[in-house]
Image (tube, rainbow, N blue to C red):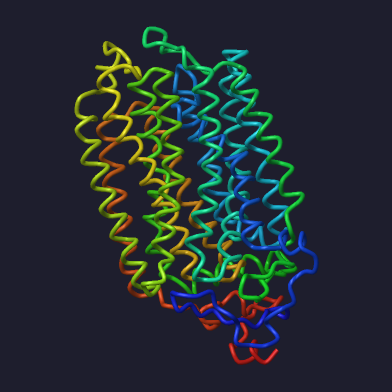
């Protein structure tokens, strides 16, 4: 395209990189505040707070099982609708993002979270409002497809290659603070719910508090910087995609798959990335604990995510290893965590079924059985954060171009949501808990095994302009040779 910035994509695994092309390095903004405002890390922190106020609080509600309701069926059906629409929208959301711009796409995506949480408040007030919750879930799916695609594009485009793990970890930590704060609120409001009174839903005050916070999240994108004005820490300018037509955007979607088909090897990993939530939230936390136990579990789950994302992010950015080495070490850590968590979880799951729980008292935080299970749930949170962070890092290792990253994150969220839609529906119709658990374990292992050839064949120690097909695409959808782009 005509406005492609000439930039170097090298990453020696140790230092932030400076561009070797003189006119790719631009002057930083003047004024202390403006320099701070236009720092990539500042914008990623703001991006984290957008997701803190939206998806973070959604995770709090979802993490308690059944959306905080006594009967989990409505919540499961709403999640099935949510992820069905999410899957379809996310596949094309990269094109929407590149056409409308990341800021506008991000803001449109925040709206659905307020409606969704508001629908559970309506259900508390009007017990027959279940259909409204399901419709709100479907609408949120459309919005979430937009939000997460814009988020992924910005988060992976702003850092230089040697900082991507750190940026992902920082974002994931702030985002999960939403779950931590929300879980703290719910724990405070439900702490005096004993084992005998365990089967109760969230109070109205909890939902109202979350509704106010999601409203704040809608406003944050208004004060974020335009991506076209952003400069990376090495002085290179972030390329802003300028595609004047929907036709060109859909051509870009096709080219992203045609010229980088190895992304398909990550699809099973993408599919697995939300699959495990259903068993963790509904079939473990929501099934065997009272509301007080569920609330405390939820708090430690999202807290552990902060540590998990930062730890794996530091590993994936380690200056002692090349990028290829980091890719395989990160894969090995994930593989080990999957087996540790699921061998541990198997010994709990084998002791209960959907039928047996009808005669089994719910576990309270004072019970002896609670302590080992909360530790298990902490490891579930660590695994989740490590899985998501590594998946984003792998996509970031394939490209630095915001246009392509929008498509890659769109594929990620689309497949992630398709899997979630199916497994939430399976839970709603009463598939046995053990079947749900084993499907989670098997899919995670399959996702990692399929990703291994992609890491071997595709991840290099640095990304070159010749790898950036979409960055070389002009406004008519034609891909220009590297020599022509460099000559501009």
Direction from residue 126 to residue 431 in the image, left or right? left
Above or below, 259 relative to 90: below
Question: Residue farthest to the right?
Answer: 31
Where residue 10 sits in the image (x, y, percent)?
Answer: 51, 80
Residues 393 and 83: in front is: 393
Q: Quadrant of the N terminus?
A: bottom right
Quarter where residue 303 is shown = top left
Residue 271 in the image: x percent, y percent? 40, 50
Q: What residue is shown at x 64% (from left), y 80% (from top)?
A: 478
Query: Residue 354 vs residue 118: left or right?
Result: left
The furthest residue to the top: 196
Residue 360 drawn at (x, y percent): 27, 13
Q: How many marks?
A: 0
* Residue for point 58% across, 50% down: 148
Q: Quadrant of residue 419?
A: top left
Residue 342's place in the image compared with 16, above or below, is above
Apparent side of residue 347 relative to residue 480 in the rendered image (left or right): left
The quadrant of the picture occupied by the C terminus is bottom right
Q: Nearer the viewer, residue 356 or 425?
A: 356
């Amino acid at each position: 395209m005509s406005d492609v910035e000439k930039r170097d994509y090298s990453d020696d695994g140790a230092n932030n990189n400076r561009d070797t092309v003189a006119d790719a390095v631009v002057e930083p903004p003047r004024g202390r505040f403006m320099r701070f405002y236009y720092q990539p890390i500042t914008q990623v922190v703001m991006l984290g707070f957008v997701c803190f106020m939206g998806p973070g609080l959604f995770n709090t509600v979802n993490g308690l099982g059944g959306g905080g309701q006594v009967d989990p069926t409505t919540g499961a059906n709403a999640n099935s609708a949510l992820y069905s629409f999410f899957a379809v929208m996310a596949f094309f959301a990269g094109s929407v993002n590149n056409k409308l711009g990341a800021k506008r796409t991000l803001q449109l995506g925040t709206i659905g979270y307020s409606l969704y949480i508001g629908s559970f408040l309506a259900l508390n007030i009007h017990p027959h409002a279940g259909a409204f919750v399901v419709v709100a879930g479907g609408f949120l799916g459309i919005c979430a497809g937009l939000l997460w695609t814009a988020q992924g594009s910005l988060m992976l485009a702003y850092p230089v290659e040697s900082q991507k793990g750190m940026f992902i970890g920082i974002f994931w930590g702030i985002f999960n603070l939403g779950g931590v704060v929300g879980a703290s609120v719910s724990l405070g409001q439900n702490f005096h719910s004993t084992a005998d009174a365990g089967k109760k839903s969230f109070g109205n005050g909890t939902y109202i508090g979350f509704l106010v916070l999601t409203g704040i999240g809608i406003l944050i994108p208004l004060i974020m910087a335009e991506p076209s004005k952003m400069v990376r820490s090495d002085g290179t300018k972030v390329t802003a995609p300028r595609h004047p037509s929907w036709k060109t955007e859909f051509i870009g979607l096709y080219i992203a798959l045609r010229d980088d088909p190895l992304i398909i090897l990550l699809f099973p990993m993408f599919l697995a990335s939300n699959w495990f939530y259903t068993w963790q939230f509904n079939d473990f936390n929501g099934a065997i604990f009272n509301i007080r136990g569920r609330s405390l579990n939820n708090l430690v789950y999202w807290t552990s995510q902060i540590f998990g994302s930062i730890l794996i992010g530091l590993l994936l950015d380690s200056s002692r290893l090349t990028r290829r080495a980091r890719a395989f070490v990160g894969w090995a850590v994930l593989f080990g965590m999957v087996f540790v968590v699921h061998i541990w979880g198997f010994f709990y799951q084998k002791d209960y079924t959907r039928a047996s729980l009808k005669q089994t008292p719910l576990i309270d935080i004072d019970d002896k059985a609670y302590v080992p299970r909360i530790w298990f749930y902490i490891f579930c949170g660590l695994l989740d954060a490590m899985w998501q962070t590594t998946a984003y890092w792998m996509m970031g290792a394939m490209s630095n171009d915001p246009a392509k990253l929008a498509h890659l994150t769109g594929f990620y969220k689309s497949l992630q949501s398709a899997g979630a839609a199916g497994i939430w529906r399976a839970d709603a119709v009463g598939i046995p808990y053990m079947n749900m658990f084993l499907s989670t374990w098997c899919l995670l292992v399959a996702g990692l095994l399929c990703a291994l050839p992609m890491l071997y064949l595709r991840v290099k120690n640095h990304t070159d302009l010749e790898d950036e097909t979409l960055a070389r695409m002009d406004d008519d959808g034609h891909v220009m040779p590297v020599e022509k782009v460099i000559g501009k």
